[in-house]
Image (spheres, grey):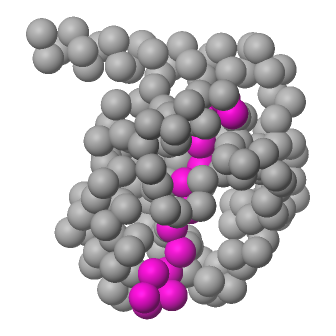
Amino acid sequence: MKTTRIIAAVAATVGGFYAGHVFTGGDSVAARQFSGNAVDQFWQATPPGASGTAQPLASFKGKSVVVNFWASWCGPCVKEMPALSAMQREYQKKGITFIWLGVDSEKNVNAFLQKVHVDYPVYIAGFGGADLARNFGNNAGGLPFTVVIDAKGTVRSTKLGEIDETELKKTLNAL
């Protein structure tokens, strides 16, 4: 039974990415071509926030940031949210910002947020958000995917799959 669920989750993830690229034609905020390295490309993105208003990610430049690529239909993404939320509250006091970047449709993200209250910035990159994640080395295109960027713009860690709280805290404590 557990194997069937895992296979179904993997199939849904792959199918979602494929459908997102086919149906959006790559025409999303995150799918645009950028120049420079992955962090520079990330700062250039201006995805809409959950409220629908475009939000320049460059406003976080110069700060330590944890970026979590997720989707409402991704079981492991939803499962790790409470741990990430708790860390966000803890590390916010230390000047570290957590950003959730939805690799999903605006409709799905907003429906999800009506059911699950979050107190951190949520942006919607659409399925093209996988392209931003690829820039950080997520060639598999899987979710969740977490990136830690320090205040100098250096990628300190990346993690494909659910976070390891101990490892992430170790990275954050070193910032």
Could you tell me which residue is drawn at 42 percent across and 30 percent down? 74
Could you tell me which residue is drawn at 60 percent across and 53 percent down? 122
Which quadrant is home to the C terminus? bottom left
Instruction: Name, please, the residue furthest toward the front.
Output: 114
Answer yes or no: is residue 51 visible: yes
Q: Which of 48 and 111 is in front in this view?
A: 111
- The quarter of the displayed image where residue 129 is located: top right
Expressed as whole percent of the image width and height from the top left, the position of residue 18 reads: 63, 17
Expressed as whole percent of the image width and height from the top left, the position of residue 162 reads: 31, 47
Q: Which of 146 and 108 is in front in this view?
A: 108
- Work out whether 65 lies above or below 8: below
- Work out whether 132 lies above or below 157: above
Q: In the drawing, does residue 155 fall left or right of residue 126?
A: left
Could you tell me which residue is drawn at 28 percent across and 78 percent down? 170
Q: How many marks?
A: 0
Expressed as whole percent of the image width and height from the top left, the position of residue 29 reads: 82, 43
Expressed as whole percent of the image width and height from the top left, the position of residue 49 reads: 71, 52
Q: Give the range drawn in magenta.
A: 92-106
- Work out whether 138 lies above or below 147: above
Q: Nearer the viewer, residue 116 or 44?
A: 116
Which quadrant is home to the N terminus? top left
Could you tell me which residue is drawn at 86 percent across and 30 percent down? 27
Magenta-drawn stretch contains 96:
yes
Magenta-drawn stretch contains 34:
no
Answer yes or no: is residue 139 visible: no
